[in-house]
């Protein structure tokens, strides 16, 4: 059994990590770039944009002109600790975006990595995956489940098959069972 100090640290760490996604959502929706980039480790890897918070700023700021208003609703958060100062998580989110008279709703799951640096928890990385993007007045539909008017480059739907257990489940159930439930099976 773990000691009380270790258990208390885990509880405090869980609570601190749980604040990161809502702080992220509020920063995006409020267009608070400073708060947004400060949620990430100082040497965040931004791929071709480089490393560091300045590189992150150069990447995210222009993307915010792709929509006017937004609301990101955090729907659930799972956290798994790899050690005392590192964790991973998955965050469900329903996001709505105003774009040229349309309200586009997206079903999102963020795949996160977290690290504690000098006693404070940060994102190391966020990978965003989608079930769909659709005008709020229309039901999402296939084959790619991405119907954002005027945004041909919106990321394609990559959930639920992004979950490692998804394909295995439907393989066990059989193609006929899958075909009974959808016109657009994931294959």
Image (cartoon, rainbow, N blue to C red):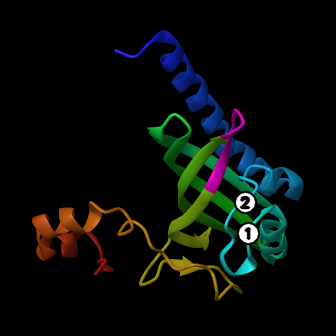
Q: Quadrant of residue 13?
A: top right
- Taking the spot 15% from the left edge, 70% from the top edge, the residue there is 171
Magenta span includes 52 = no
Point out the tag, 2 or 1, that comes first from the N-terminus. Answer: 2
Q: Indicate the position of residue 180 as horizontal and vertical percent values.
A: 20, 71
Task: Kindly state the secondary structure of the residue where label 1 is placed.
Answer: loop
Q: Which segment did they paint magenta? A: 117-124
Count of marks, rendered view: 2
Secondary structure under badge 2? Answer: loop
In this rendered view, identify the residue nearer to me: 115 or 97: 115
At which x and y percent is residue 127?
56, 64
- Give residue 100's position: percent from left, percent from top: 81, 78
Q: Out of 88 and 186, give the one closest to the viewer.
A: 88
10 Å neighbourhood of mark 2: few (<14), some, or many (≥20)? Answer: some
- Quarter of the figure with residue 46: bottom right
Q: In the drawing, what numbered circle is on residue 43? A: 2
Residue identified by numbered label 1? 51
Above or below, 161 against 110 in this view is: below
Q: In this view, does 99 lie to the left or right of 134?
A: right
By secondary structure, the bulk of the magenta-drawn segment is best described as strand
User: Which residue is at a point 62% across and 65% down the rendered structure image?
Assistant: 105
Q: Position of residue 57 (x, y in %)?
A: 83, 67
Quadrant that contains the C terminus: bottom left
Question: Hey, which residue is sitting farthest top in the picture?
Answer: 4
- Residue occupying the point 72% across, 50% down: 24
The answer to whether 109 appears left or right of 167 in the picture is right
User: Which residue is depicted at the point 77% across and 64% down?
Assistant: 52
Q: Tell me the quadrant of the picture where the N terminus can be found.
A: top left
- Residue 31 appears in the picture as rendered: no
Q: Is residue 28 above or below residue 179?
A: above
- Mark 2 and 1 residues: CB-CB less than 8 Å, in contact? yes
């Amino acid at each position: 059994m773990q000691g009380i100090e270790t258990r208390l640290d885990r509880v405090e760490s869980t609570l601190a990590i749980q604040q990161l996604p809502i702080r992220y959502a509020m920063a995006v929706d409020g267009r608070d770039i400073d708060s947004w980039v400060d949620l990430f480790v100082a040497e965040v890897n931004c791929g071709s944009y480089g490393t560091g918070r300045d590189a992150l700023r150069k990447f995210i700021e222009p993307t915010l002109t792709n929509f006017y208003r937004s609301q990101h609703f955090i729907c659930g958060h799972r956290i798994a600790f790899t050690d005392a100062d590192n964790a991973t998580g998955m965050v469900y989110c329903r996001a709505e975006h105003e774009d040229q008279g349309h309200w586009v709703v997206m079903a999102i799951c963020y795949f996160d990595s977290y690290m504690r640096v000098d006693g404070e928890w940060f994102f190391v990385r966020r990978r965003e995956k989608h079930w769909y993007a659709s005008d709020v007045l229309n039901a999402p539909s296939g084959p790619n489940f991405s119907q954002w008017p005027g945004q041909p480059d919106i990321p394609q739907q990559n959930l639920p098959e992004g979950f490692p257990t998804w394909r295995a489940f439907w393989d066990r159930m059989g193609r006929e069972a899958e075909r009974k439930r959808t016109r657009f099976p994931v294959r």
